[in-house]
Amino acid sequence: MEKRITGSTGLLGLIGSPVSHSGSPAMYNYSFRELGLDYAYLAFDVPIEEVKHAIQAIKTFHMRGCNVTMPCKTEVVQYMDELSPAAEIIGAVNTIVNEDGKLVGHITDGTGFVDNLKDHGTQVKGKKITIAGGGGAATAVQVQCALDGAGAISIFNRKDAFWGRTLETADKIKAACPACEVAVYDIEDAEKMKEEMAESDIFVNATIVGMKPMENETVVKDSSAFHKDLVVCDVVYNPIETRLLREAKEKGCKCIGGQGMLLWQGVAAFKLYTGMDMPVEGVKKILFGE
Ligand code: NAD
């Protein structure tokens, strides 16, 4: 590393809190080294109150860009000079690119989800997709699937603090992608969920259900709703195989976990920063030991 860092090495980073568990520094620094790019990537623990100063620092230090994680993804939006179409609809940013002093905010979580599906041989174009969730990850997935040509999206969420946002997202998708049919239902209505799943090609859990410490729970209460033509996806990556995926696999469904979404959102951000493709196979080895 000491041979690689010079007086002209460019800086990229991650802001949010906590960040010490993040796989991003390993993923990006490996890729810079492999591709001979003169950049270094560090993680900075930045609480929400410090976001304004962190954004100023991107400009002051002439950083090429910065990834943003929780809890700062919506907070940074107000400081962007420009937003990508998805970031505009979602109202959140996970990738800031510094274009000669102009900060452009992107969100690559949804792209990461769609590209992970592609990596597993599943396309979203023209498909009917049932998605559980109305929070940050769910919104990104819903908007990107619609932008990438999904035919219909049925959203299920609890009538909790996220319900209003879920309805708003549906309205925004209808306005931006009129060809995509969007409907929102109460997640407690298991019968309706079963009905929507029966007509769907893809089912996605984008809630926190199934994530530790809720690893014994699942959003699909009636496992007879799984059918063999349904691709079942979870954005949860801790544990790697959730109860949802385990039960869907037992019913013969193709299953896709959340780890790949993490990888592919980074691949998309890397392309925005460098214009180059991340060496994905090597990065998979680092992140997943594959
Ligand atoms: P969030 O807090 O923004 O949203 C939480 C969602 O869970 C809401 O829809 C809420 O209504 C729902 N929910 C909470 N408790 C519930 C319950 N008991 N029953 C049903 N629904 C319930 O969270 P988020 O940032 O969207 O994260 C959701 C999951 O996605 C987390 O597990 C997170 O780790 C994961 N995630 C994965 C990736 C990835 O790259 N794979 C990226 C972002 C988030």
Image: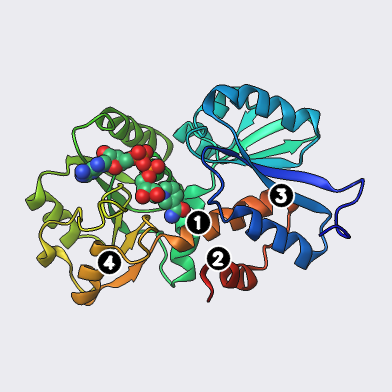
Question: Could you say which disc has been placed on residue 245 in the image?
Answer: 4
Does residue 83 appear left or right of residue 34 in this picture?
left
Residue 262: mark in rendering:
1
Q: CA distance from mark 2 to mark 4?
A: 21 Å
Q: Are marks 2 and 4 in contact (CB under 8 Å)?
A: no
Whether the residue carrying mark 1 lies under 8 Å from ligand 1 is answered with yes
Residue 13: quadrant of the picture: top right
Q: Name, please, the residue furthest toward the left.
A: 191
Which residue bears the numbered disc 3?
41
Q: Secondary structure at mark 1?
A: helix
Dot 4 or dot 3, earlier in sequence: 3
Element marked by disc 2 = helix
Query: Alpha-carbon neighbours of circle 3 within 10 Å: few (<14), some, or many (≥20)?
Result: many
Residue 270 lies, in percent from the top left, at 66, 54
Q: Nearer the viewer, mark 1 or mark 3?
A: 3
Within the image, what quadrant is residue 277 found in? bottom right
Quadrant of the displayed image that contains ligand 1: top left
Q: Determine whether the residue tagged by mark 4 lies in a helix, strand or loop.
A: helix
Q: Which mark is residue 287?
A: 2
